[in-house]
Every structure is written in structure tokens, then in C-alpha cells.
Amino acid sequence: MLGHVDALAGHADDPDAVRLAAWFHDAVYRPDRSENEERSAALAVRALTGAGLPPARVDEVARLVRLTVTHHPGPGDRNGEVLCDADLAVLGGAPEAYAVYAAAVREEYAFVPEPDFRAGRAAVLRQLLALPALYRTPTAHARFDAPARANLAAEVGRLETPGEDG
């Protein structure tokens, strides 16, 4: 993710805050919990305050970490656009890399019964496909949007086909 942040850093207003947010965005992660981003943001606040970073930078990092709940930065939120695009870049990888990612997602949610996982995952992917744009920065949109849509559509197809691995 940091490599993607670096590639998109020219779009950000504060690339260093975005890099710090990338480090902290999944610092606390349990797939069966909904407060991961909030806990990760709190960890960032504690760690960065303790390291002596200015309060404005700490607040921006925490805000960015929380933004990864929705991946919907507001208009003009250039830092948020870079972080969200970097976080979603995995969707636009080569089909083989995307397959590895999709398998890891299934493994992460192994506690969810197969029919429920298929239905829930397909619904999430259809929501992503319905977005007018998956990526906000011009660079990420040009590089990742078409491959991401192909990957997402292919996975939806597998999930909705009985007997196919999801």
C-alpha cells in the first residue's frame, strides 16, 4: 500500500500524513469486528502524540484512518483520495494477484458459512461495480479502474455460479 501512496503522493496535500495513515489503517484488525478503524485511529493518536508529532498532523492521520471505513472522501479531500485509492489498488491488480487477494479474503472470513459469504461478498462487489468511479485520483483511475471492474465482475460471476470456488 505504501508503494501506491508513493505513486500517488503528488496528488496529496500532505503525503506524509497519508503515509502515516497507511501504516496505521489496519493496525488493529479483526474480521469479525466493526470497530477496527476506530481502534486503529486511537492507536495512531497515542503513538504519534507520544512521538511528538504536531496535533494537527495527528488529527489528520486519525481522520484518514477513520475514512477507510467508507472509502468516500469528500470533495477536495486530496489526502483522503490518495489513501482510499492506495487502499483499493489491490482491486485493480493483475487477475492472478487479484485471485490471491480474493482467496485471502475468503480465508479471513472462514468463520462465515459458504452460502452467506458468497451472498454477502457478491453484494459488496456489486455495490463497488455500481459506483461511477472506484478511484478518485486521475492516476489511479487511469491505471486501476478498468482492471478492477474486470476483476470484480469475474469474482461476482464465480460467487454466483454454484460449484465455483469463491
Image (cartoon, rainbow, N blue to C red):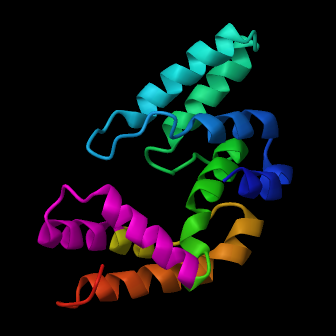
**Dominant SS type (magenta):** helix
* Residue nearer the viewer, 125 or 29: 29
Residue at 23 percent across and 85 percent down: it is 160
Name the quadrant containing residue 86. bottom right
* Residue 40 percent coordinates (x, y): 49, 30
Magenta run includes residue 99: yes
Q: Is residue 8 above or below residue 124?
A: above
Q: Say if residue 128 shows up in the picture.
A: no
Identified at 81% across, 52% down, the residue is: 6
Rendered position, 156 above or below 24 = below
In the displayed structure image, the side of residue 37 where residue 90 appears, left or right: right
Quadrant of the rendered image containing residue 52: top right
Query: What stretch of residues is rendered in magenta?
Result: 96-124
Q: Residue 82 versus residue 41: which sits nearer the camera?
A: 41
Work out which quarter of the rendered image holds the C terminus and state it: bottom left
* Residue displayed at 44% across by 48% down: 70
Q: Is residue 130 left or right of residue 45?
A: left
Q: Is residue 39 above or below residue 72?
A: above
Q: Position of residue 129 (x, y in %)?
A: 43, 75
Residue drawn 26% across the image and 89% down it: 164
